[in-house]
Amino acid sequence: MGNIFRVLLSRMQLKTCDNVKHFALRIADRPGLPAAIASALWQKGVNIETFTAELHRGQGTFHLVVDKVAVAKETFMENAWEATEEKVPAPTLANRPGSRIPTL
């Protein structure tokens, strides 16, 4: 999976935790699909803590960390979005300028 979620940024503040659950959704190269996923989660009261999206040769992967894992899983199943779930280690960082630099 790489270093996608080694450092989590949430609402302009560093989020500190030992492990987080992360979802990876395989998506087609279709305009508006990431927005549709975000909207469906929002309608269920799920906040996206952080995300990234990758696109390669017409196929993409949308990576998400959310605050309500069970509700997000239910939303993915309701919409027939195939999602895998993993625990990802995240370092604990001090909430001060420059604290992220040594981890990169």
Image (spheres, helix red, strand yellow):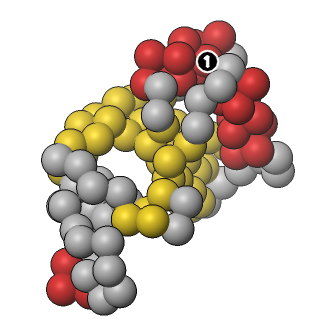
Task: Using a 10 Å C-alpha cutoff, classify the residue at mark 1 as few (fewer than 14 neighbours), some (14 to 19) or many (20 or more).
Answer: some
Q: Give the quadrant of the N terminus.
A: bottom left
Residue at (29%, 41%) from the top-left corner? 20
Q: Give the quadrant of the C terminus.
A: bottom left
Residue 102 seen in the figure: yes
Residue at (46%, 34%) from the top-left corner? 67
Report x, y in % for residue 47: 58, 38
Vertical position of residue 70 compared to residue 18: above or below: above
Vertical position of residue 67 compared to residue 93: above or below: above
Report x, y in % for residue 92: 19, 61
- The residue where tag 1 is placed is 75
Report x, y in % for residue 29: 71, 50
69 vs 60, left or right, is left
Quarter assignment of residue 78: top right
Badge 1 marks a residue whose secondary structure is: helix
Amino acid type at image mark 1: Thr
Towards the viewer: 72 or 61 = 72
Residue at (69%, 39%) from the top-left corner? 38
65 vs 53, left or right, is left
Residue 2 seen in the figure: no
Residue at (24%, 37%) from the top-left corner? 87
